[in-house]
Image (spheres, helix red, strand yellow):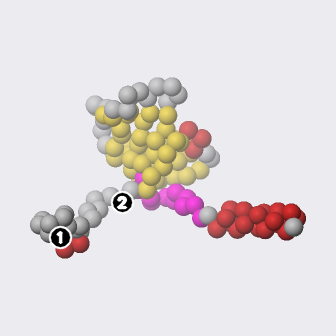
Amino acid sequence: MFMRSLVLLLALCLALCVSAEAKHPVIGDYVRVAYNLGAGPSVSFEGNITDISDGLICLNCTNVIALNHKGKGASPDGIEYPFDVCIGTGQISMLIWLVPNEVIYVEQSQLPRPEGGGL
């Protein structure tokens, strides 16, 4: 009985590992890449991926946000956009896919109505 349970558990774990399909960044994706500068602030770059090779992801950067240790962000002054930047993949703490200039439109009839029926 124990052996049957163990085999079933291993088969379930294998199925879960194989079924998880992660998205990988590709050239042309519009992303935000963040990395931590050690114990201090973190920096995020936003832009289109221009190259992925040799442990680097390169972007045509359209926005930079620097977060201080309190979590407050600001764009540094004096930067001319766009510019090219390459980040080591081992330093990346977060990568988010973005959709540039997308506006999500929801019709009023699709909005939840408050109690009492008025909107």
Write the start and end of the magenta stretch as one range.
21-31
Give the amino acid type for the residue marked by disc 1 in the picture: Gln
- Is residue 104 toward the left or the right of residue 35 in the image? left
Q: Is residue 83 above or below residue 97?
A: above
The residue positioned 42% from the left and 36% from the top of the image is 43
On-image quarter of the N terminus: bottom right
Q: Which mark is residue 108?
A: 1
- Helix, strand or loop for disc 1: helix
The residue positioned 37% from the left and 32% from the top of the image is 71
Give the amino acid type for the residue marked by disc 2 in the picture: Val
The residue positioned 36% from the left and 40% from the top of the image is 64
Mark yes or no: residue 21 visible. Answer: yes
| Image location (x, y in percent) of residue 10 | 78, 63
Query: How packed is label 1: few (under 14 Cα within 10 Å), some, or many (20 or more)?
Result: few
The residue positioned 18% from the left and 64% from the top of the image is 115
Which of pointers 2 and 1 lies earlier in the amino acid sequence?
2
Q: Is residue 28 magenta?
A: yes
- Is residue 94 toward the left or the right of residue 81 in the image? right
Q: Which mark is residue 89?
A: none
| Image location (x, y in percent) of residue 117 | 14, 69
Q: Which mark is residue 99?
A: 2
What is the distance, in whole Å, between disc 2 and disc 1 at their CAs?
Answer: 23 Å
Nearest the camera: 74 or 56? 74
- Helix, strand or loop for disc 2: loop
Query: How packed is label 2: few (under 14 Cα within 10 Å), some, or many (20 or more)?
Result: few
Mark yes or no: residue 58 visible. Answer: no
Nearest the camera: 19 or 115? 115
- Is residue 52 toward the left or the right of residue 1 in the image? left
